Amino acid sequence: MRLKVKASKSVLIVDDETDVLELFKESLEDLSCQVFTANDGQKALSFLASNKVDFIVTDISMPNMTGLEFISLLHERSDLTPFFFITGYHDYPREDLNRYKPRAIIFKPFDFAEAAMLVKNHLMRLSKND
């Protein structure tokens, strides 16, 4: 059974772990999403300078630029694209993470199909508001 969205929605996944990028990408493509990937925050910012996506999923802990820095820079650009944080660290104070206003925080390890469905559900809600 496939969930239907008005039009193909686009998602950018930002993570320094290739396996996470590929497995998450496959899971979202299985749900008819158009998926782009970047292996660090700087590449994601460069991509977003000339492209728009409907949703972002970003790891928090990455070399060169953390997910927190990435989202902060997006907000400075007035880019308020909805996003999820993903992280393997459970010691981030939730109130600190919530300052960035993520739609959700997903802790590794996680089931990629379930996480993709969570993204898809948020995209469906966003579609209803369009």
Image: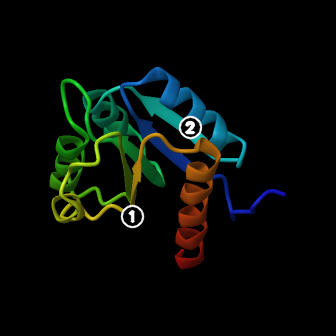
The kind of residue tagged 1 is: Arg
Quadrant location of the N terminus in the rendered image: bottom right
Which residue is tagged 2? 24
Q: Position of residue 79 (x, y in %)?
A: 28, 56
In front of the other: 92 or 16: 92
The 10 Å Cα crowd at callout 2, few under 14, some 14 to 19, many 20 or more, is many
Q: Is residue 17 left or right of residue 25?
A: left
Reading the image, the residue beneath label 1 is 103
Q: Residue furthest bottom?
A: 129
Colouring rule applied to residues: rainbow
Tag 2–tag 1 contact (CB < 8 Å): no
Question: Which image quarter is the C terminus in?
Answer: bottom right
Q: How many marks?
A: 2
In the rendered image, residue 54, in percent from the top left (x then y), is placed at: 48, 55
Horizontal side, residue 31 vs residue 46: left or right: right
> What residue do we see at 23% from left, 42% from top?
70
